[in-house]
Image (spheres, coloured by chain):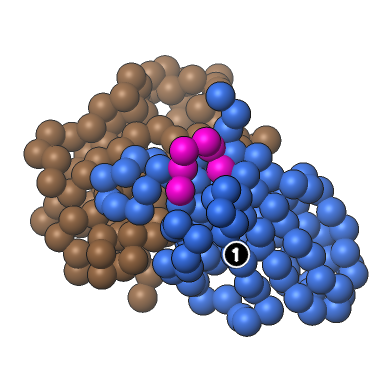
Chain colours: A brown, B blue
Amino acid sequence: AQKITQTQPGMFVQEKEAVTLDCTYDTSDQSYGLFWYKQPSSGEMIFLIYQGSYDEQNATEGRYSLNFQKARKSANLVISASQLGDSAMYFCAMREGRAGGFKTIFGAGTRLFVKA
Amino acid sequence: DAGVTQSPTHLIKTRGQHVTLRCSPISGHKSVSWYQQVLGQGPQFIFQYYEKEERGRGNFPDRFSARQFPNYSSELNVNALLLGDSALYLCASSPGLGVGTGELFFGEGSRLTVL
């Protein structure tokens, strides 16, 4: 069974608008971490934001925020005020806890297109 | 400080050959993970090493093997290459192994083409 699900293969957003990229996850661990990475066409993986399973507040990093709903097992990324440079692939990832060997697994990704 | 470095950056092999990919983690990082990323897909977990021991293995055939050296650098070996092994191979390092040890730091990858 997939442990990280990103249901949006592609998303379009107008420049300066906000966009939400969806991510749901599945784990039996109580302790785990959730990450979002950006991968431009150049191929590098850029870390954006992190949310720990015990963190009560949603994480924010500049224009990025993570909408963490633990009971629903969702960790959506919100990008505010989109910029043309935000066009890229976005991956949701989870570091599993002890039961999962602490490995980090990735979703299939969402390709974001920002329109001028 | 140097980031995660991988070599070679690009290579072309033919079916049946063997390949060795190398990775040097960020100084002080003791955990190295390997991922295979086929074009248009997410990174697939191959191996995780911590303190020179294999601590996780993904759903890859035995043709894939890896090791971590005393200086924490790592090698990924793939034998009997198949066309389907063509991909970007990413190495990532982190300081430790636990949930709270922070994000993975990625190298720029080794792009393998199998003809």
Report x, y in % for residue A15.
47, 20
Element type where label 1 sits in the image: strand
Name the residue nearer the viewer: A5 or A98.
A98
Chain letter of mark 1 equals B
Residue range (magenta)? B25-30
Residue at position x 31%, y 24% from top?
A61
For disc 1, the marked residue is: B67
Image quadrant assignment for residue B95:
top left
Q: Is residue B7 visible?
A: yes
Image quadrant assignment for residue A32:
bottom left
Image side of residue A6 versus residue A88, left or right = left
At label 1, the amino acid type is Arg
Quarter the C terminus of chain B occupies? bottom right
- How packed is label 1: few (under 14 Cα within 10 Å), some, or many (20 or more)? some
Residue lying furthest front? B70
Image side of residue A1 versus residue B92, left or right = left
> Would you say residue B29 sits in the magenta stretch?
yes
Residue at position x 57%, y 48% from top?
B71
